[in-house]
Amino acid sequence: MNKNRQFKLARRPQGMVQRADFEFVETPVPEPGEGQFLVKNEYLSLDPAMRGWMNEGKSYVPPVGLGEVMRAGAVGRIVASKHPQFAVGQHVVGLFGVQDYAISNGKGVTPVDPELAPLPVYLGTLGMPGMTAYFGLLEVGQPKPGETVVVSGAAGAVGQVVGQIAKIKGCRAVGIAGGADKCRYVVDALGFDACIDYKAEDVKKALKTHCPQGVDVYFDNVGGDILDAVLTQLAMHARIVICGAISQYNNTAPVKGPSNYLSLLVHRASMKGMVVFDWADRYGEAAREMAGWLASGRLKTREDIAEGLETFPETLLKLFKGENIGKLVLKL
């Protein structure tokens, strides 16, 4: 009989996530009830947001409970169904968790077509990271042709899409990433105008060089010192999109806030947080436009695929060590 392997949250992590923060269990494969279906997960999405979901406290979604299956986006195939709108054999994407099999009632689940794009792409550019980039940049950042858009975490799942959309919209795109390989990828493969290696360069000096007229839109995925550096280089009426702060997620000390925030006053700039779920009713619109860009070659995507559910804790750490290029996905 098939078993359902699961990673459950065993304790709240202190600092960097460890394998001991999870309990690995095997349970019987569940049977769907009326109005439900059973999904066999094929790929799991590993995202920086997962670290925040493990913490207790107020956030934009409830924390994962102790003893609960770790929350994760996934794409898989329906293998049993008692739901009139979801058929056996369909591929679907949803928050199915870090496990082999998941029961769903269809809420928040989207059918996908593996003939139109490889399944991992639905967890990246055509999934939550792509939606985050699309709505965060276009709705919050509101870039105008000719403006300079800077994005941190430029070689990651969200950042790689932000810079490419900026180029599609007629902007200059400057990335910030860690390491020469990532910077080469961002410029040579994705078409950014420049990429600053924060591990080898003075970010503030490099921003002056690559953004001589200042930064019009800054899409922030990392927070900390890099956000502070960008604040010193703002153009008038700049817009800062606060999407994430991966540099701060594993801190045991309080989160470091920006010391250069008065630049917002001087430059009449704005800084606004965004959570992609606020545009859930428009995901289809974004997916159609980005699928068109992918088909025409104007938008490129890259997935960093690891294998084996049992490797989940160690693979997740690649995000926080900066070891992935593109969207990190775990193949089951």
Image (cartoon, grey):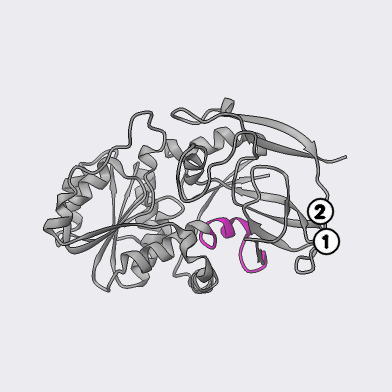
Q: Residue furthest top?
A: 20
- Tag of residue 143: none
Which image quadrant is residue 149 in?
bottom left
Left/right of residue 37 with respect to residue 122 in the rendered view = right
Separation (CA) of disc 2 from disc 1: 7 Å
Label 2–label 1 contact, CB within 8 A: yes
Residue type marked 1? Lys
Left/right of residue 7 with respect to residue 322 in the rendered view = right
Callout 1 environment at 10 Å: few (<14), some (14 to 19), or many (20+)?
some
Which image quadrant is residue 10 in?
top right
- Could you tell me residue 318's position as x and y percent? 49, 37
Q: List the residue tagged with mark 2.
A: 32
- Say which label, 2 or 1, has the lower sequence index: 2
Quadrant containing the N terminus is top right
Residue 300 visible in this rendered orientation of the protein: no
Left/right of residue 148 with respect to residue 85 in the rendered view = left
Q: List the residue tagged with mark 1.
A: 82
Quadrant containing the C terminus is top right
- Could you tell me residue 166's position as x and y percent? 34, 66
Left/right of residue 287 with respect to residue 180 in the rendered view = right
Q: Give me the residue at 34% from left, 29% from top.
A: 253
* Total numbered circles: 2
The range drawn in magenta is: 113-127
| Along the line of sight, the residue nearer the viewer: 274 or 300 | 274
| Along the line of sight, the residue nearer the viewer: 312 or 236 | 236
Residue type marked 2? Pro
Q: Residue furthest front?
A: 58
Callout 2 environment at 10 Å: few (<14), some (14 to 19), or many (20+)?
some
- Could you tell me residue 222's position as x and y percent? 35, 45
- Could you tell me residue 244's position as x and y percent? 39, 49
Dominant secondary structure, magenta: loop
